[in-house]
Amino acid sequence: MTNTELAKMIDRRNTLYARIDALSTMDTNTTIQAIKLEYAEELTRLDNLISEKREYIYNFVGGGWNSEYALTVEDAIAQAQARWGDDKRLQVDTSSFRMSTPESMRAALSLFH
């Protein structure tokens, strides 16, 4: 996820909260209750996505790899650069960042065998 995608999710979440508040002042017929329930379910999903850090795998120029846990790919890049910035042997390849999957982690770990 990028910072832009995260910002869009936060905007959507805020919109849904405002709509639920507005609907709460209306007559509570079954249609409005169903809309509020639908919004609440989407809010739960968005809250989980917004607050969950993901593992991003990246490579070093000249070989090797590591990973960072972050909310967005931009945050992961910043963390990696802060982590390895002083080490001249380990230059972070910022174009190599990708979200970790079980398959990509298995492939990366297979390099140790």
Image: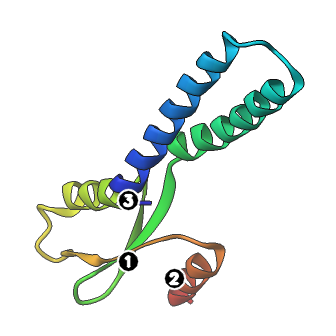
Q: Along the horizontal axis of the image, is 106 left or right of 56?
A: right
The spot of residue 24 in percent (x, y) is 69, 14
Mark found first going from the N terminus, 1 or 3: 3
Q: Which mark is residue 108?
A: 2
Q: Label 2 vs label 1: CA separation? A: 8 Å
Residue drawn where x is 59% and y is 26% of the image: 19
The spot of residue 75 in percent (x, y) is 32, 53
Relative to the observer, which residue lies in front, 40 or 108?
40
Q: Is residue 62 above or below residue 52?
A: below
Q: Quadrant of residue 20?
A: top right
The crowding category of the residue bearing disc 2, from other C-alpha atoms within 10 Å (few below 14, some 14 to 19, many at least 20), is some
Mark found first going from the N terminus, 2 or 3: 3
What is the three-letter code of the residue carrying label 3?
Thr
Label pair 2/3, CB-CB below 8 angstroms: no
The crowding category of the residue bearing disc 1, from other C-alpha atoms within 10 Å (few below 14, some 14 to 19, many at least 20), is some
Q: Which mark is residue 65?
A: 1
User: What residue sits right under mark 3 in the picture?
Assistant: 2
Q: What kind of colouring is applied to the model shown?
A: rainbow
Mark nearer the viewer, 1 or 3 = 3
Q: Label 1 vs label 3: CA separation? A: 21 Å
Q: Along the horizontal axis of the image, is 102 left or right of 66?
A: right
What is the three-letter code of the residue carrying label 2?
Ala
Q: Label 2 vs label 3: CA separation? A: 23 Å
Assign a secondary structure to mark 3: loop
The spot of residue 68 in percent (x, y) is 41, 59
